[in-house]
């Protein structure tokens, strides 16, 4: 091997490491901040002989030049808002040992088309893929013991909680009857959602569940008024709330939107 080529190969890890700032804790490395030029980035699995095990809070926040990220199997945790506002991010590859995805981890990654969550993930924070306007599918490995996906929608394993509806899915949606809880902001900025049917099993809806669903025209409730009308439909100026005859608790408005009797 020519001396110059050998020197370049030896220098490569140093160049890669120079794109990040790190913190050390108990013999492991956490990425505190990405300082590189963007493009396709592969996170190193070792730095100075220590394993890289975490991507810290806000580590890639607002890195608009980032186009893809490959996360090695050494990493177990992605912090809150770690990749928020990475506006050109179009590909995410998780390592097989990731266990935690923080709240808002990929918020407003508006060019991300799909994401696959490995079997190893046991903790997902609130609104992890919110406002991802091109996201059409969140797929969970079937061997995951805590989470699941149906038609690209993220649920807990028993499908009693709907965690995230992909922002790029368009048209009407009927929530499965197994669902009792809608996470806060679970439908935020789903601008292509035109109608949603909510089964009578749903008794808990988080704050801002349907914020900024600009195409939402009809919400159909199959049960009684759940009594949880705080800040559900902010900026949903076209939405009408429809309820069935014989159900109770409905007034002229719900969540700030007008109601109407639904006769299917």
Image: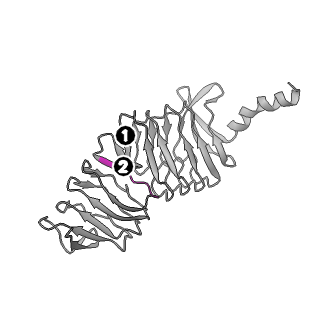
Relative placement, left or right, of 77 versus 235 is right
Question: What residue is at 30 percent from the left and 44 percent from the top?
Answer: 159
Relative placement, left or right, of 219 versus 154 is left
Question: What residue is at 37 percent from the left and 55 percent from the top?
Answer: 186
Marks 2 and 1, how far apart at CA? 9 Å
Q: Residues within 10 Å of mark 1 (few under 14, many from 20)?
A: many
Instruction: Indicate whether 110 appears above or below 214.
Output: above
Query: Which quadrant of the rendered structure holds the N terminus?
Result: top right
Question: What residue is at 37 percent from the left and 41 percent from the top?
Answer: 148
Instruction: Indicate whether 227 appears above or below 66.
Output: below
Q: For residue 70, which quarter of the picture?
A: top right
Nearer to the camera, 238 or 22:
238
Which region shows up in magenta? 161-168
Q: Which residue is mark 2?
A: 163
Check disc 2 and report its element: helix, strand or loop. Answer: strand
In contact (CB < 8 Å): disc 2 and disc 1: yes
Q: Which mark is residue 147?
A: 1
Q: Which mark is residue 186?
A: none
Q: How many marks?
A: 2
Check disc 1 and report its element: helix, strand or loop. Answer: strand
* Residue 205 within the magenta-colored segment of the rendering: no
Relative placement, left or right, of 34 versus 160 is right
Residue 185 location (% of width, % of height): 37, 57
Relative placement, left or right, of 135 versus 35 is left
Q: Is residue 36 visible?
A: yes
């Amino acid at each position: 091997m020519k001396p110059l080529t050998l020197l370049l190969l030896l220098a490569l890890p140093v160049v890669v490491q120079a794109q990040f700032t790190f913190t050390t804790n108990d013999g492991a490395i956490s990425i505190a901040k990405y300082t590189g030029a963007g493009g396709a980035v592969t996170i190193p699995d070792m730095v100075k002989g220590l394993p890289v095990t975490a991507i810290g809070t806000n580590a890639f926040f607002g890195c608009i030049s980032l186009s893809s990220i490959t996360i090695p199997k050494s990493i177990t945790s992605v912090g809150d808002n770690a990749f928020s506002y990475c506006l050109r991010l179009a590909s995410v590859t998780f390592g097989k040992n990731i266990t935690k995805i923080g709240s808002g981890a990929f918020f407003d990654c508006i060019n991300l088309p799909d994401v696959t969550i490995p079997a190893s993930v046991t903790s997902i924070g609130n609104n992890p893929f919110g406002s991802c306007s091109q996201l059409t599918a969140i797929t969970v490995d079937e061997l995951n013991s805590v989470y699941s996906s149906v038609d690209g929608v993220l649920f807990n394993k028993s499908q009693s909680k709907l965690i995230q509806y992909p922002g790029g899915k368009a048209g009407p949606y009927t929530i499965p009857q197994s669902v009792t809880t809608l996470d806060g902001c679970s439908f935020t900025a789903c601008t292509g959602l035109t109608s949603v049917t909510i089964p009578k099993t749903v008794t808990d809806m988080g704050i801002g569940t349907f914020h900024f669903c600009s195409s939402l025209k009809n919400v159909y409730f199959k049960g009684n008024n759940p009594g949880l009308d705080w800040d559900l439909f902010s900026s949903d100026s076209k939405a009408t709330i429809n309820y069935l005859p014989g159900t109770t608790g409905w007034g002229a408005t719900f969540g700030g939107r007008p109601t109407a009797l639904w006769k299917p």
